[in-house]
Image: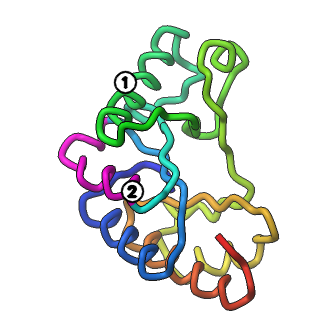
Amino acid sequence: FDDGPHAVYTKRLLEGLRERGVKASFFLVGENIPGNEELVKQMSEDGHLIGCHTYSHVDLTKCTLSEALCEVEMTDDLITGITGKVVEYVRPPFGNWKDSLAEALPLTVVRWTVDPEDWKDQNREHVVAKVKKNVKDGSIILLHDNYRTSVEAALDIVDDLQKEGYEF
């Protein structure tokens, strides 16, 4: 899940994942963390992976190396300060990454294999259908935890895929 934490929707998502016994990966935007520290703490306590999605959701390939490092390090510092755990993963906004960043940042880059463009569509049923059409064993599904429709779709997807035998 990208772009959170969101005070309302991330909380609902965490509750739904907890009810289903599912762990997820959350890639946080640093500027969304202040005021939502308890949600970040809950993510960590619930055993979810927490990674960086930059501080202000910028295209890192359009930044200077110094600016890109600042975007990542500021977010990592916020996450580590709340969870006590060092951040190991980054999802670059828009999937854009360059080799000079890999050399400067000791983080594992995580992309996706299924993108239903939930941020664009914001239609629960369409998002569920797109994911179910394209998912296969080992898929990394990209969704966002800052839209009501995406959170609802995510929980529907979990329910449907678990019935089909998928594990998360």
When the figure is inspected, residue 102 is found, relative to residue 49, above or below; the finding is above
**11 horizontally vs 62: left or right:** left
When the figure is inspected, residue 11 is found, relative to residue 104, above or below; the finding is below
In terms of depth relative to the viewer, which is nearer, 124 or 140?
140
Q: Residues within 10 Å of mark 1 (few under 14, many from 20)?
A: some
Q: Residues within 10 Å of mark 2 (few under 14, many from 20)?
A: many
Q: Which residue is mark 2?
A: 43
Determine whether label 2 and label 1 are within 8 Å by CB: no
- The number of callouts visible is 2
When the figure is inspected, residue 8 is found, relative to residue 30, above or below; the finding is below
Give the label on residue 99, or none: none
Q: Main secondary structure of the magenta part?
A: helix
Q: Position of residue 145 (x, y in %)?
A: 42, 61
Q: In front: mark 2 or mark 1?
A: 2
Q: Position of residue 91 (x, y in %)?
A: 58, 40
3D distance between C-alphas at marks 2 and 1? 19 Å
User: SS of the residue at dot 2?
Assistant: helix
Residue 150 is inside the magenta segment: no
When the figure is inspected, residue 93 is found, relative to residue 68, above or below; the finding is below
Residue 36 is inside the magenta segment: yes
In terms of depth relative to the viewer, which is nearer, 42 or 68?
42
Q: Residue at x 43, y 37 (%)?
A: 85
Give the label on residue 74, or none: 1
**Which residue is most to the right?**
137
Image quadrant in which you'd find residue 45? bottom left
Q: Residue at x 52, y 51 (%)?
A: 49
Tell me which amino acid carries mark 1.
Answer: Met
| Residue range highlighted in magenta | 31-45
**127 horizontally vs 40: left or right:** right
Quarter that holds the C terminus: bottom right
